[in-house]
Amino acid sequence: MDYEILDEAVAHIQQQWPDAAPACGLILGSGWSDVAEAFEIKDTMTYISIPGLGAPGVAGHSGRLVWCEHAGVETFVFQGRRHWYEGVGWTPIALPVYALKKLGAGTVVATNAAGGIRKDLKPGDLMILRDHINHMGSHPLIGPHNETWGTRFADQTYLYNPALRALLHKAADQCGVDVTEGVYLAGSGPTYETPAEVRACQAMGADAVGMSTVPEATLANAAGLRVVGVSCITNFAAGILDQPLTHKEVTAATQVAMPRMKTLLLEFWKLLADAEC
C-alpha cells in the first residue's frame, strides 16, 4: 500500500472541497451507482482526478466521488469501487476508507452485488451482512503496519456493527422493504465460482458470494470506523440453476431492485441522523 499516494489523494480532496466534513461514507458496488442521485448533491469529482484512485475497471461503477447529504448527515458517496482482480494493488481499494478516516467520518456503509447460495435467497433480495469470509487469497493489511489501521492485529468479532445492523432492520421495517441477514464470502475474481467452489463456500457457512467489500470492511473496522454492509442478490450462484452466469444479469437485477435500495438507504440515513452518526 502506497501511503504517499494515499496522503496525496486526501490532500487533493481537501484542496478541492476545503469545507467538506463527511460524517459517513457510502461505497456503492456493482449496479448501485444510481443510489447517489437520491441524495442532495453538493459537488462531484471523477475518480481519475483523484491521485491513486483511477477509473473503475468494470461496468456498473460510475467512478465519481459525490459530496452530498441527506437528513442533515454530510456524506461522501463513492460511486463504484476498484477491485483486487483488476491487478492494481491495494492502494486504490483502500483509498476511500483511508480518506474517510482522515477526513473524520465515523461510519462506512458498503454495498455490493452478490450471488445467492442460501436456498431462500433470490435475485432482487437485499441481505444485510452479519459477517464475512475472506476467500480472496490475500489481505489488505499484509505489509508494514500503519497506525491508521489501529493495532497490528485488529479484532473482527463485531466487524459489522450490531447497532447499525439493527438500525438497518428498523429502517427496512419503517419503509416496508424486506431484508434478510447473512454471511458474505469474497473471492478474488474475476471469474465466477465453479459449482464445486460454490458447494465449498456453502460448506464454509456462506450465504452469498462476491468479489468485493471484504477489503474495505476489514480496513474500516481496523481503523475504528463503524461498518455495515448490504448485498443485492443479483443471481443464483453457479450450479444452483443449470445456466451460465453473466454480468448483464447482475446489472439488470440491481436496476429492478433500485427503488427498494434507494428507499432503504434514505430511511437508514434518517435514523443515522437521529443516532448522531
Image: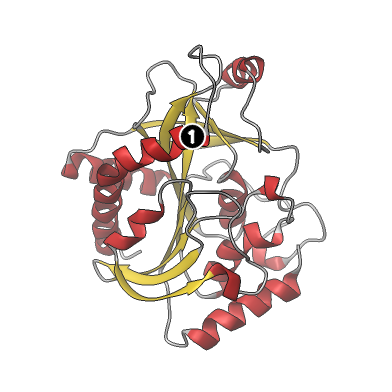
Residue 18 on image: x %, y %: 47, 88
Of residue 166 and residue 60, the one placed in the foreground of this image is 60
Relative to 192, is 275 above or below?
below
Looking at the picture, which amino acid does disc 1 mark? Ala
Of residue 252 and residue 146, the one placed in the foreground of this image is 252
Residue 188 figure quarter? top right
The residue indicated by pointer 1 is 114
Query: Quick one: SS at disc 1?
Result: strand
Of residue 131 and residue 91, the one placed in the foreground of this image is 91
Which quarter shows the C terminus?
bottom left
Identity of the residue drawn at 47% across and 49% down: 60
Relative to 234, is 261 above or below?
below
Relative to 201, is 60 above or below?
below
Badge 1: few (under 14), some or many (20 or more) residues near its Cα, within 10 Å? Answer: many
Q: Is residue 61 left or right of residue 40?
A: right
Q: Is residue 86 left or right of residue 229?
A: right
Q: Residue furthest top?
A: 242
Give the colour scheme shown.
secondary structure
Residue 16 on image: x %, y %: 50, 85
Identity of the residue drawn at 75% across and 37% down: 137
Residue 4 on image: x %, y %: 74, 75
Identity of the residue drawn at 26% across and 55% down: 266
Q: Does the rendering let one see residue 160?
A: yes
Residue 95 figure quarter? bottom right
Residue 101 on image: x %, y %: 55, 68
Of residue 216 and residue 53, the one placed in the foreground of this image is 53
Q: Does the rendering let one see residue 275?
A: no
Relative to 94, is 193 above or below?
above
Which quarter shows the N terminus?
bottom right
